[in-house]
Amino acid sequence: MKIGVVGCGNISGIYLTNIGGLFKNIEVAGVCDLIPEKAEDRSKTFGGLRIYRDMYEIFADPEVDIVLNITRPNDHYGVTKAALLAGKNVYSEKPLATNMEDARELVALAKERGLTLGGAPDTFMGAGIQTCRRLIDEGRIGKIVGACAHMLGRGPEGWHPDPEFFYKKGGGPMLDMGPYYTTCFVNLLGRAEWVTAFGGISFPERTIGSEPHRGERIKVEVDTFATGAIRFASGAIASLTVSFDTYAERGSYIEVFGERGSILVPDPNTFGGPVKMLTPGKGYEEIPLDRGFTQNSRALGLSDMADAMANGRLHRANSMQQLHVLDIMTAFARSSKANAPVEITSPFERQPAVDPDRICGTY
């Protein structure tokens, strides 16, 4: 299937590398960006890709099967809606939208039009988290009691070339990095039911330390430290903390606790390992990863979506999952504002585990 790429920012490079490279069932039809020079640079780097004048030219191209929306988070809703209205299937970078009202509208629109909608993150399909899922599903640590996770850092203004959007509405550590952690949780623990959380803005202004905006000040509009608990339908309870305000040696951490042991889950922003399992009397031992995807395999979810469309099944990185993850993430701010628990009402069903032999175009 042919992919029309909207957005040529930082993340586009790995997508363009893997589409048609690692994944043979999808190929790039062409690219566009609001800043023409970015599209021209990507076209040159990747062998003379077609450059569309704008996203509407992509939508009008009958050869484009799927629109890949890798614009900034605040633009996801508008680009995806326009593509759906034009009759195009869409795979979007995370999050699906920046609020639940817009996200529900997109899901309903795709259903109404008979179109396929899905998106990132797809890291849960990598060998690391898939190995953890198998261990849990096989009962290796018994019934799951709970889990904990944190993503701690000082924010992107020290390295990102244009970091302001991370601190504006639709940004923050929860919507930026939270999708990796919450997507991991629901794939290991199942559907979430309740969230209780608190959040705040530790530093009202941030100073950019990277070029070309070094020294400029950013006024912060979103919580940059959030912490809370998620109760799952299974009865398991997980804690999650995300921050752009902290110094931490171990910035990424996830552990799942069972009746008979625990599992250290790898960084959910990666596809590989390591995976370590703790059992009484043995301590932690590293578990060999199941066969699958360990390198940076972004576009794995897109390739799986194309395969699902061709074979009449539901893809794994689907809009139901994206909606449920957004429901959990936005519940942190809603709970903090209300000083009360928030119910998660969106549906969610885990899809079958990944079979590397059936992923898409790698054979």
Image (tube, helix red, strand yellow):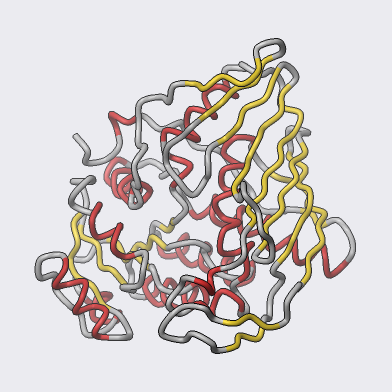
Q: Is residue 18 above or below residue 28?
A: above
Whole-percent x, y for residue 240 in the image? 71, 49
- Residue sitting at 52 percent across and 72 percent down? 158
- Which of the 4 image quadrants contains residue 87? bottom left
Q: Quadrant of the C terminus?
A: top left
Query: Residue 44, percent across and down?
Result: 13, 72
Q: Residue at x 52, y 29 (%)?
A: 275
**Would residue 216 be found to the left or right of residue 361 on screen?**
right
- Can residue 182 be seen here? The reply is no
Left or right, residue 136 beside residue 142: left
Along the horizontal axis of the image, is 29 left or right of 190? left
Residue 331 seen in the current view: yes
Q: Quadrant of the N terminus?
A: bottom left
Q: Residue furthest right?
A: 339
Q: Is residue 341 above or below residue 224?
A: above
User: Tag count in the figure?
Assistant: 0
**Furthest-bottom residue in this view:** 216
Q: What residue is rendered at 18% in x and 52% in y?
A: 20
Between 356 and 291, the one lying in front of the other is 291
As displayed, is residue 296 above or below residue 256?
below
Residue ID at (61%, 80%): 168
Residue 119 location (% of width, % of height): 44, 56
- In front: 11, or 78? 11
Question: 142 or 210: nearer the eye?
Answer: 210
Residue furthest to the left: 48
Where does the image place residue 191, in percent across and percent down from the top left? 66, 42
